[in-house]
Image: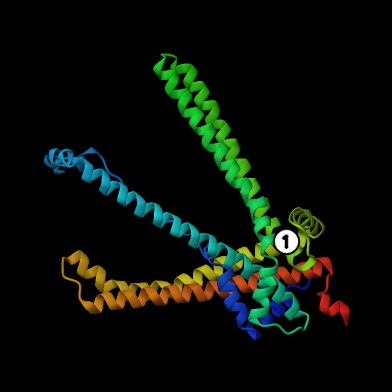
Amino acid sequence: MDYGNLFRRSWDVIWNHKFMLVLGFLAALGSGAGGGGGGNSNYTFDGSEFENMPFETIPELSQNMEAFVAAMAAAGAIIAGLLCFFFIIAIVLWLVRLTAQAGLIDAAYRLDAGEKMTFGEAISAGWQKLGQMVGLNIVLFGVFFVMAIIGAVVLAMGIGATVAGAATGEGEVGAVLGAGLVGLICCLLCVFLLFAIVVSVIYPFAQRAVILEDKGVFSSISRGWQVIKENLGEVIILILIFLVLGIVVGALTFAVILPIAALSFAPTLIRFFSGGALEVMDVLLASGGLLCIVLFGAAINAIFVAFRSSVVTLAYGEFTSKKPAAVLAE
């Protein structure tokens, strides 16, 4: 495979058709293609946190228990409503992402073949394949959900065995059972990691089997695996190239974002730690810097996602020597 030619053609496709960048942005929604969306907290506390709490208000609370219960019920309803709202938003973003991914694949292949295509046509093509894309995601990634449940059950059994052994005076038996179950969890984690690697490699090729060859959910997985086996060396090289590109792009992005963040947030942080009052300009500067960082990161991510998708699409075409239907009809 001529990787230089492959990368040049892919770049020409997205650079000469700027709507591909919009598709790249939509294809990365909520996916973490440029990073995860988790929000980890490192805050810890101990019993001393409660020493100065106003426990004298508890009698008043008990006297107004009905009002308290009503307030908690209202708060619970609001929280439940917000959770449902964000769950619906997450589902919508997921469907938009899958539609854009399918449209990106179809557009890259057809544009490289010399056909003309618009953003609306790409979205329409992606929408037609949405059902198969959803099914593919459920089949491949639903296994992770099942494995997570199995791991949680095994962990609960291990904790239960250890606690039961300690409570009945058979701590050694409980410890052995607990250790055995912990070992089983470690094995499950290894299987989980191995499966995750395999799925992450198969998934892009299965997607292209769905879009370019109109395969069903299970047949696309089989087809993707077949293409990988028949072109294993080239696939490994592509993976390594994109790993290196990802590191380089990430480093360059960080090198640009770091000074922007420093200039934007430095005045606010200095005033905060020195005990001074924040000024309007500090807030505006920090907000503007945050907006610049988000926009810049989104732009870089959109370019990288669109380019990577186009490269894999054109590589899949070379692996399978398949031509678009319009080209075959000529």
Q: Where in the figure is residue 89, as x and y percent of width and height? A: 49, 62
Q: Position of residue 206 (x, y in %)?
A: 73, 59
Left or right of 156 on screen, residue 54? left
For the rendered model, the colour scheme is rainbow
Locate the N terminus and report the quarter of the image it occupies: bottom right
User: Hey, which residue is sitting farthest left in the picture?
Assistant: 56
Identify residue type, mark 1: Phe
Tell me: residue 107, above or below residue 36.
Answer: below
- The answer to whether any part of residue 170 appears in the image is yes
Lateral position of residue 305 relative to residue 9, left or right: left
Locate residue 294, reporting x and y percent.
Answer: 43, 73
Q: Give residue 116's quadrant in the image.
A: bottom right
- Quarter in which the C terminus is drawn: bottom right
**Residue 268 figure quarter:** bottom left
| Identity of the residue drawn at 60% across and 38% down | 188
Mark 1 lies on residue: 205
Element assignment for label 1? helix
The answer to whether 7 is drawn above or below residue 188 in the figure is below
| Foreground pick, 222 / 325 | 325
Q: Is residue 230 above or below residue 6?
A: above
- Residue 321 in the figure: left or right of residue 158: right
Q: Residue at x 39, y 75 (%)?
A: 291
Q: Position of residue 110 (x, y in %)?
A: 75, 78
Identify which residue is drawn at 36% across, 51% down: 77
Q: Quadrant of residue 200?
A: bottom right
